[in-house]
Amino acid sequence: MADQELAWMFENCFPNTLDTTVSYSEKNGEPSTYVITGDIDAMWLRDSSAQVWPYLPLAGQDENLKKLLKGVLLKQAEFVLLDPYANAFYNDPDRISEWKDDRTTMKPGVHEHKWEIDSLCYVIRLAYGYWKNTGDTSAFNNNWQEAMKLILKTFRAQQRK
């Protein structure tokens, strides 16, 4: 970048999401990446996708980043299978939300149960972007495929209301 101050700001800001909102672990030998949104300890499907989207172009050249992003895909699939009508989830599958008395069915592990079509669309968008940038299909395991089938089933159900 020609502007040195702008380059310095970018260099300091670009890794911020990875430094402050991402928790990486492994589950059954696969990556599992939980991404909080801001100061709330919950992972929104849409927001987590948007937060990691800028890193996709680098994932094909960095194995650790690729694993981290694959972990987001797998975590999102896990959450969709828990409840395709929820939009935000906890990393702890037993945690009970403060919204537990809402008129909707609040399962443990669900932070917020609000139907938002864009939440499920962002899950698909991130998976596509990951594949286009890495060529890696290993994230698209049986669990992920079942989550995609559930997304389609949910879209069909909402389309007919």
Image (spheres, grey):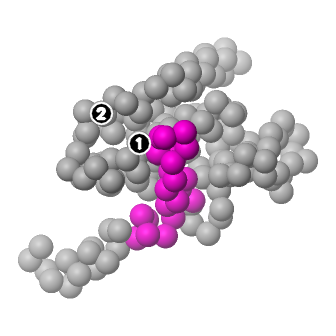
What residue is disc 2 on?
136
Residue 155 shows in this picture = no
Identify the amino acid type marked 1. Answer: Lys
Q: Which label is found at residue 23?
A: none
Label 2 close to label 1 by CB (< 8 Å): yes
Give whichever of 72, 67 is nearer the camera. 67
Q: Is residue 136 left or right of residue 16?
A: left
- x and y percentages locating residue 57 in the rendered image: 24, 49
- x and y percentages locating residue 18 in the rendered image: 42, 64
- x and y percentages locating residue 15 in the rendered image: 35, 68
SS at badge 1: helix
- In the picture, which quadrant includes the N terminus? bottom left
Identify the residue shown where x is 28% and y is 79%: 9
Q: CA distance from mark 2 to mark 1?
A: 9 Å
What residue is disc 1 on?
70
Give whichever of 51, 75 is nearer the camera. 75
Identify the residue shown where x is 66% and y is 17%: 157
Identify the residue shown where x is 20% and y is 77%: 7
Q: Is residue 65 magenta?
A: no
Badge 1 crowding class, 10 Å Cα cut-off, few under 14, some 14 to 19, many 20 or more, is many
Q: Is residue 26 magenta?
A: yes
Q: Is residue 14 left or right of residue 25?
A: left
Residue 117 shows in this picture = yes
Residues in magenta, as a range:
16-36
